[in-house]
């Protein structure tokens, strides 16, 4: 099994990067949809259209990409357990990815609030939180490429 993982490591890395990019695209776009959804009248055609767009983005793109990001990332760690002990960069990266996971869960919760027409947040709130995945992405990419620790 270890030979298979090592021989296909670049494929797992490729899948990991593609999945991460797809997940990030959704993490950038969903809060932006919420910014516009806040302004739509409850029960309006526009509000209902946003609900469909948000559901499809979350369930068809973001969640599968997140799962694939985790699976491919854990596979790479399993293939090369030494990277887990050679530096703190991987630990920092995993903490940032875990925080990204929490952000994903919060976006999902807020989508359910919109679904029930019970959104409690303002347009300004969604504009501000839209910066969170960008900050986390900087940490993740720096840790993965530069490995400063």
Image (cartoon, rainbow, N blue to C red):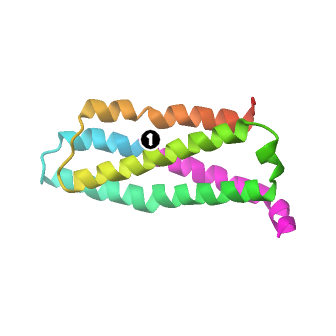
Work out whether 148 lies above or below 49.
Answer: above
Residue at the spot x=80%, y=63% of the render? 5
Residue at the spot x=19%, y=51% of the render? 47
Q: Please state the extent of the stretch shown in magenta in the rendering.
A: 1-28
On whether residue 31 falls in the magenta region, the answer is: no
Residue at the spot x=30%, y=32% of the render? 125
How would you classify the magenta stretch by its main secondary structure? helix
Pinpoint residue 32: horizontal percent, then vertical percent. 35, 40
Residue at the spot x=46%, y=46% of the render? 102
Looking at the image, residue 97 sits to the left or right of residue 87; the answer is left
As drawn, which residue projects farthest toward the bottom? Answer: 1
* Image quadrant in which the N terminus is located: bottom right
* Image quadrant in which the C terminus is located: top right
In front of the other: 57 or 5: 5
Work out whether 71 lies above or below 46.
Answer: below
Q: Which residue is mark 1?
A: 28
On whether residue 15 falls in the magenta region, the answer is: yes
Pinpoint residue 11: horizontal percent, then vertical percent. 75, 59
In front of the other: 72 or 83: 83
Pinpoint residue 42: horizontal percent, then vertical percent. 13, 49
Work out whether 148 lies above or below 45.
Answer: above
Residue 15 occupies quadrant: bottom right
Pinpoint residue 116: horizontal percent, then vertical percent. 19, 56
């Amino acid at each position: 099994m270890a030979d298979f993982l090592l021989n296909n490591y670049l494929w797992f890395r490729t899948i990991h990067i593609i999945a991460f990019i797809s997940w990030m695209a959704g993490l950038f776009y969903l809060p932006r949809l919420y910014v516009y959804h806040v302004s739509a009248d409850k029960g309006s055609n526009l509000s209902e259209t946003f609900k469909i767009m948000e559901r499809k983005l979350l369930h068809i793109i973001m969640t599968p990409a997140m799962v694939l990001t985790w699976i491919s990332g854990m596979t790479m760690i399993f293939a090369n357990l030494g990277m887990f002990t050679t530096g703190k960069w991987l630990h920092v990266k995993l903490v940032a990815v875990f925080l990204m996971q929490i952000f994903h869960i919060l976006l999902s919760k807020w989508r359910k609030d919109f679904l029930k027409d019970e959104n409690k947040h303002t347009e300004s709130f969604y504009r501000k939180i839209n910066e969170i995945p960008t900050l986390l992405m900087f940490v993740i990419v720096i840790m993965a490429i530069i490995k400063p620790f």
